[in-house]
Image (spheres, rainbow, N blue to C red):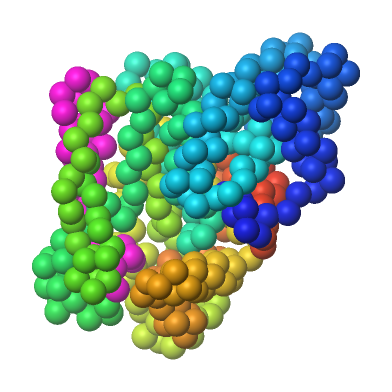
Amino acid sequence: MADPHVQTFSGQDDWLARLLQHLVRGEVLSVEDKARLEAALLHENWQCQVFGITADTVHAVVTERSQLLQDIYPALTELCRDRLGWQTVNLALFWNLWLPLALAIVAYRQQQRQPLIQGILGVQGTGKTTLAIIVTLILDYLGYRVCSLSLDDLYKTYAERCQLQIREPRLRWRGPPGTHDIDMGLMVLNQLRTASSHPVQIPRFDKSLHQGAGDRTMPEVVSNIDVVLFEGWFVGVRPIDPAAFDQAPPPIVTEGDRQFARDCNTRLQDYLPLWDLLDRLIVLYPSDYHLSQQWRQQAEQRMIDAGRSGMTDREVSQFVEYFWRSLHPELFIKPLLHDAQHVDLVVDINPDRSRGAVYQPRIGG
């Protein structure tokens, strides 16, 4: 979630990070340090509520997390450096969120006989892909076979989207409802859930093909999957009352904008069978949805600085606002923060991309 180039630590995280550094260096913590870790977990009510920590279990929790952190740290640093381009690891975030979340996924998987499908919803820049990468590393170490599937992997082919744009010119870019092959998604998720040792072909999508329009590439073949991490910018999002578009927030301003939003809302109905296959859903929620535009601009600028092609700030604004016109975060994602029926966990993301509050949905606001 947190980008090491912009991350900040609270005073508590700063203290915790220093103590965790002793752990990853293989040092034995004193009785006092262990007691301090236990007290810190019990003091944070959200840890107790979300991960079920009590005074009776906190000692075992600290012992387990400490051992896993020491064991996984070498592979974690290598992954963060080579795959994520990070020079440092946010140990406090690993300790407080990534590690306990992975352990919770293991517990949920153990409660059922079939593979667990964990949904991850987050707008651009919230770190859903990063979360999936880190959790996969932990689950791999614990002996669980993990498959990551992005909503992007379910895009229709380039040829199919070209034909789609002829029929529906408003879908000029991939992304909104209607640009995905839902039947393929249902087939893949059902195969992952029931196929056992039989190989399953996981679709993959390369965004760089066709001058950035993207197309499907060689599928990945997997088998014996225990956990599926299914992430995307509107995974789990459900249709809303069409009356909401009568007074919609910008950039839904013209009657054409409102009709496009209504049509996308209608197409969401087709995705409900996909969402019904989710066992659990995590929502990564930015403190201000406008931040996704800023974060996308930063990502594009880093690509330009590295000598690769990237969008200008104006192009980014047009691109992101296109997504907002189709499924506006205020209308479609914010209500999920109170949807205890479909959402299991919410992680607030601060403007610097550090972790904010972590909580279960607040029923009724």
Q: Position of residue 8 (x, y in %)?
A: 73, 54
Residue at 12% across, 73% down: 163
Q: Please, is residue 332 above or below residue 49 in the view?
A: below
Q: Please, is residue 20 above or below residue 119 in the view?
A: above
Residue at 32% across, 21% down: 114
Q: Position of residue 32 (x, y in %)?
A: 88, 18
Q: Position of residue 355 (x, y in %)?
A: 66, 49
Residue 234 found in image quarter: bottom left
Residue 278 found in image quarter: top left
Q: Is residue 174 magenta?
A: yes
Note whether residue 160 is visible.
Answer: yes
Read off the magenta span.
173-201
Q: Position of residue 82 (x, y in %)?
A: 45, 46
Residue at 44% across, 88% down: 254
Residue nearest the observer in this picture, 215 or 175: 215
**How many circles with numbers are drawn on the protein?**
0
State left or right for residue 29 relative to residue 163: right
State left or right for residue 21 relative to residue 276: right
State left or right for residue 263 relative to residue 333: left
Q: Is residue 43 magenta?
A: no
Residue nearest the observer in this picture, 88 or 257: 88
Note whether residue 243 is visible.
Answer: no
Residue farthest right in this picture: 32
Residue at 77% across, 41% down: 13
Q: Please, is residue 45 above or below residue 211 in the view?
A: above
Residue farthest bottom in this picture: 254
State left or right for residue 81 relative to residue 188: right
